[in-house]
Image: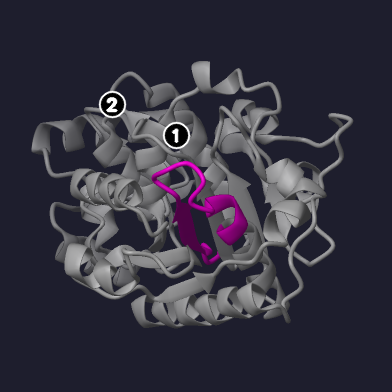
Amino acid sequence: MEEVARVILALEEHDVAEEVMHFLDRTGRARVVATASDEHQLSEAIRQLEPDAVVGSPRLATSARLNGSVLLAVDTTETVQTLRRALKAGARGFFLWPADRGELARAVARVFAPGTRERHTLGRVVAVHGPRGGAGATFLATHLAASFARRELRCVLVDLDLGIADIGPAVGAPVDGSQRTIADAVPMGEELTARHLDDLLWPHPDGFRVLFGPADGQLAERVTARDIGPVLEAVRSAADVVVVHVPRGMDDTVRLGLGLADVVVMVLGLDVLSFRAAKRVVDATGLDDRCSFVVNRATRREISPDDVKRVFGRSPVAVIPVDRRVPAAQDHGRLLPARRRAGRSVDRLAAKLLERLEEGS
């Protein structure tokens, strides 16, 4: 008998579950070995049956232990929240039912190859967000990536700024347009593999790799958060830590980057406008305990780092001193040496973030 993918179906709506189950059975590419309607049932079924794939709603899958099974997320509506949950759960793809049922069948077929079940652990995500221009998010993102790499972690830095894409110049990328960007990754969608990433990611001399934002700034007008999602999932499968440079604003791509993160580094300047902008982001996204505040370019001012706790209810995890060499270094595409005072502060921040990631794992 021809071997097919063994699937656990985890959908809350009984009628939809019936439709999906009969559809998968008819494809001849999958066999539904169990169904689940809540998180406990799903976790227990995975533990006992060790399926090749779980086809289910993002809400149910978020709390379940997949134990290496591939997750294919299915829902009847597409919202930023459902996409965020799907990515958080490590879904290999998101499919709108019934519109995407053909794509779902092909994804199920790709999951199973006799004797070669793929198992991997997704990398943890650190999002760096400066809610106000000039806060120093680019500086923090690039230097955190270098700090993680010095700890012999596979680190990928992803520029989600589809409009300005200033990570490239900050790390000294070639200016001849030869480097690949996220614009090259988006069309591959769910077909994006580690082999493709080897061609797409630019190796920095300090040991991390970079997925650049588009050089022409036109991609932002053509892609959605759903397009970016599979790219981030593929990058996570090829890294221990992914540093995501999240731009200003509050569009779906920004929400996706912040929502996917295990830890969000909120970069603050010591001024009222920076605090107000950060407060708006925190209130709009519900970041809660995932948010770590960092004061950048700290100098003696009327507003002090102590005011962070007064406004946000917690103290900053790091205070990065002002370093007048930063602008010149970034203009020449160089990172500060780790031995400099600001560099040491970022390195201590990286250690604290890794501790938080370990506690949450």
Label 1: state its secondary structure: loop
Residue that badge 1 annotates? 28
Q: Which residues are magenta?
A: 117-140
- Residue 359: percent from the left, percent from the top? 37, 82
Please state which amino acid type lies under the numbered disc 2.
Trp
Q: Is residue 300 visible?
A: yes
Residue that badge 2 annotates? 97
- Residue 91: percent from the left, percent from the top? 42, 48
Work out which residue is located at the far left of the displayed protein and give it: 14
User: 118 and 209: which one is in front?
Assistant: 209
**Residue 160 drawn above or below residue 332:** above
Left or right of 341 in this view: 285: left
Q: Is residue 1 visible?
A: no
- Residue 217: percent from the left, percent from the top? 62, 22
User: 161 and 9: which one is in front?
Assistant: 161
Residues packed near mark 1 inside 10 Å, few (<14), some (14 to 19) or many (20 plus): some
Question: Is residue 130 within the magenta segment?
Answer: yes
